[in-house]
Amino acid sequence: MLQKIKAKIRGTIDIHRLIKDGLKVGKNLNIQYGVIIDPGHCWLIEIGDNVTLAPYVHILAHDASTKKALGYTKIGRVIIGNNVFIGAGTTILPNVRIGDNVVIGAKSLVTSDLPANGIYYGHECVKIADYSEWIEKQKERMNNAPIFDKSYTIGNITIDKKIEMKKKLIDNIGYVI
């Protein structure tokens, strides 16, 4: 309990709790101040050996932008390889794989896979669709995507269901109630 309080005050995460809930981490993980690793879906995240998460990195395995309109939240796995440096203020979104030997510059937004042996940087916000068109696209995607009920959420999910969810989301976005 004291560790949780200290972590909250210091702006750090309780990595031990996340690991207990299913987060996979390799050796020599360096987590700096203000990092957020999605606590509600941490079992969908895997981090390799010799990884540095600079201050204020956010790793998200969910995207709640669909929750109000569809009643479901998009979810996807995040897999980070070995020997990766993720710069300060970077956000990694669901359904992303980052290869080995990668450096990601500060304030980057990672929305798609980053192959191994590369240096990446970028953050640009542009309109990609009208809202109604986007919701329709999400509804269409739901027809072929894995759908998970409340028993797949933190506080309810079993180890077997975590394993099942990870398998179903190997290369897909899914949706959870």
Image: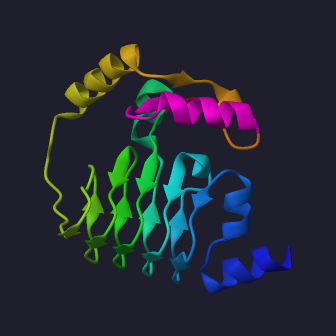
The residue located at (45%, 77%) in the rendering is 52
Please say whether residue 157 is visible from this viewpoint.
no
The x and y percentages for residue 82 are 42, 66
Whether residue 52 sits left or right of residue 90 in the image: it is right
Magenta-colored span: 156-175
Q: Nearer the viewer, residue 68 or 172?
A: 172
Residue lying furthest top: 143
Residue lying furthest right: 1
The residue located at (75%, 35%) in the rendering is 158
Identify whether 141 is placed above or below 95. Answer: above
Identify whether 76 is placed above or below 146. Answer: below
The residue located at (28%, 78%) in the rendering is 106
Q: How is the image coloured?
A: rainbow
Q: Nearer the viewer, residue 3 or 64?
A: 3
Whether residue 49 sits left or right of residue 109 in the image: it is right
Quarter of the picture holding the N terminus: bottom right
The x and y percentages for residue 78 are 44, 50
Q: How many numbered dots are placed on residues in this image?
A: 0
Quarter of the picture holding the C terminus: top right
Identify whether 102 is placed above or below 145. Answer: below
Q: Is residue 138 magenta?
A: no
Res. 140 image quadrant:
top left
Q: Is residue 163 magenta?
A: yes
Identify whether 8 is placed above or below 165. Answer: below
Res. 159 image quadrant:
top right
Please say whether residue 43 is visible from this viewpoint.
yes
Whether residue 139 sits left or right of residue 60 in the image: it is left
The x and y percentages for residue 7 are 69, 79
